[in-house]
Amino acid sequence: MDKFSLLCVLVQKLQNMSHLTVEQRYTIEVMKSNGYKQKDIAKAIGKDRSVVSRELKRNCDRRSGEYRHDLAQRKYHERQREKPKSIRFTPGVQRAVEELLRQDYSPEQVVGTLRKRDEKTVSTERIYQYVCADKKRGGTLHAHLRSQGKRYRKRGSAKDNRGVIKIGSASSIAPRWLKRGIDLAT
């Protein structure tokens, strides 16, 4: 197998690397109950057969041993919910962010200052989200921002009239000879 063919196979495998959908789980259930092999099921849903094998082992009903798509989807969502997530916005980081914001630092300056001090920090977007949530709870952090939590006016809207010269109708700016109906061809 040459390098190009190998690369094509790898790209195809990477494209298939995504979570199973409800429709794919339903297809697995129907085909499994009709006696299809895992290889055929995998081909039908566009996944590798190891994905189907893992799905059947992981999400079968423990009591009856049957595969049900609705149960499999519930188990999938449960695993996603219980997955440990790295929490970077710890109470310590939160206190440092609040302290700097109350000193009228912008979120960008907060991140830069914490990095200079070699302290843990979060993104500016996360700080803006925190300020917005604080405002909804009745807090005052938004008052320390330069825009004080107000949204900027979006450019390019249909109501933008800057630089537009307002005139009446086209007839009000037409030359006099045009208004009188003079024919220039004669």
Image: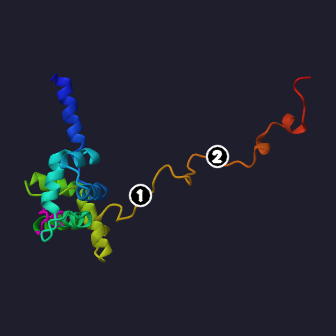
155 above or below 66? above
- Disc number placed over residue 165 in the picture, else none: 2
Quadrant in which the C terminus is drawn = top right
140 relative to 39 in the view: left or right? right
Vertical arrangement, residue 41 with respect to residue 177, above or below:
below
Question: Do the numbered discs 2 and 1 sit on residues whose CB atoms are within 8 Å?
Answer: no
* Mark 1 crowdedness (10 Å alpha carbons): few <14, some 14-19, many ≥20: few
Q: Earlier in the sequence, mark 2 or mark 1?
A: 1
Single out the mark in the foreground, 2 or 1.
1
Task: Place residue 85 in its image quadrant.
Answer: bottom left
Dividing the picture into quadrants, the one containing residue 176 is top right
Please state which amino acid type lies under the numbered disc 1.
Tyr
Q: Residue 169: give x, y in percent of width and height.
A: 75, 47
The residue indicated by pointer 1 is: 152
Comparing 104 with 154, the one in front is 154
Residue 62 position within the rendered picture, expressed as x and y whole percent measured from the top left: 12, 69
Residue for point 12% across, 58% down: 57
Q: Position of residue 88 (x, y in %)?
A: 13, 61
Query: Is residue 29 shown to the viewer in this render?
Result: yes
For the image, the number of numbered tags is 2
Residue 88 visible? The answer is no
Using residue 167 as the reference point, say whether residue 155 is left or right of it: left
Q: Circle 1 — which element? A: loop
| The magenta segment | 79-91
Q: Looking at the picture, which amino acid does disc 2 mark? A: Ile
Report crowding for label 2: few under 14, some 14 to 19, many 20 or more residues within 10 A (C-alpha). few
- Assess whether residue 89 is covered by the magenta stretch: yes
